[in-house]
Amino acid sequence: MRAQGDAGRHQERMFATEHARLAARDATAFHLVPMATSMPVPAMQSSKPMGISPSAPDFKPTIRYIWIIRISTICCNKGKYSHQFYTLNYYHLVLIWDCLIRIIISMIKFHYCFYFISFYFKLLFMQKGAKSLLKVSIKAATRSAKTAETTITETAI
């Protein structure tokens, strides 16, 4: 019984070591971690939960990242890389989804969408003077869209 438990732990350690090695190799190959930290990753302890990439220190399993991972995994499974977990496709999808979510959150936080939302609410609740309201709202919306565009460009850079 004890030998069977030891064998199971050994197999788990071997899997964790291989998992960590592949994750570190792929992360450094796709320039996700600085080259200075691209040394071999030590074997993970069996008591720790398996993460997405042990070489990505900022990758905290928050709700946002869990959904990013789910969406990215679904996209990868439908593509030709379904047999590989760590691929260029997978990491790029995670980064793209994360960037999009950050942009949407920042737009909501800084009220760049305020004029668009208020435009629809004003049309719903006020029917008099809809044409003049439309002109004012379109001007305000284009002004805020230009501001949002520059912010998105800065965020992307």
Image: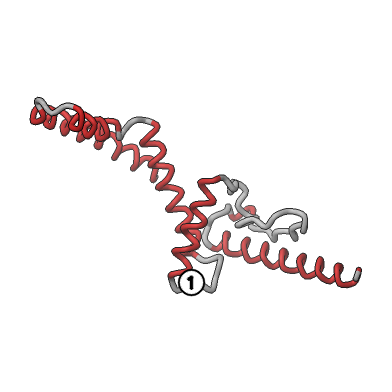
In which quadrant of the rendered view does residue 53 lie? bottom right
Residue 45 relative to residue 20: left or right:
right
Residue 83 relative to residue 75: left or right:
right
Q: Residue at x 70, y 59 (%)?
A: 41
Q: Out of 79 and 40, give the one closest to the viewer.
A: 79
**Residue at the right extreme, as displayed:** 2
Residue 58 relative to residue 155: left or right:
right
Locate residue 4, reporting x and y percent. Answer: 86, 72
On screen, residue 135 above or below 19? above
Please state, as top left, top right, bottom left or bottom right, where the N terminus lies in the image.
bottom right
Locate residue 155, reporting x and y percent. Answer: 39, 41
Q: Residue at x 91, y 68 (%)?
A: 2
Q: Residue at x 54, y 71 (%)?
A: 84
Q: Out of 49 and 32, give the one closest to the viewer.
A: 49
Residue 143 relative to residue 19: left or right:
left
Locate residue 135, reporting x and y percent. Answer: 11, 31
Count of number-bearing discs: 1
- How are the residues colored? secondary structure
Helix, strand, or loop for circle 1? loop
Amino acid type of the residue that numbered disc 1 sits on in the rendered structure: Tyr
Crowd around label 1: few <14 · some 14–19 · many ≥20 (10 Å): some
Please state, as top left, top right, bottom left or bottom right, where the C terminus lies in the image.
top left
| Residue beneath disc 1 | 81
On screen, residue 139 above or below 28? above
In which quadrant of the rendered view does residue 75 lie? bottom left
Q: Residue at x 60, y 52 (%)?
A: 56
Locate residue 76, reporting x and y percent. Answer: 47, 66
Q: Out of 43 and 135, give the one closest to the viewer.
A: 135
On screen, residue 124 above or below 19? above
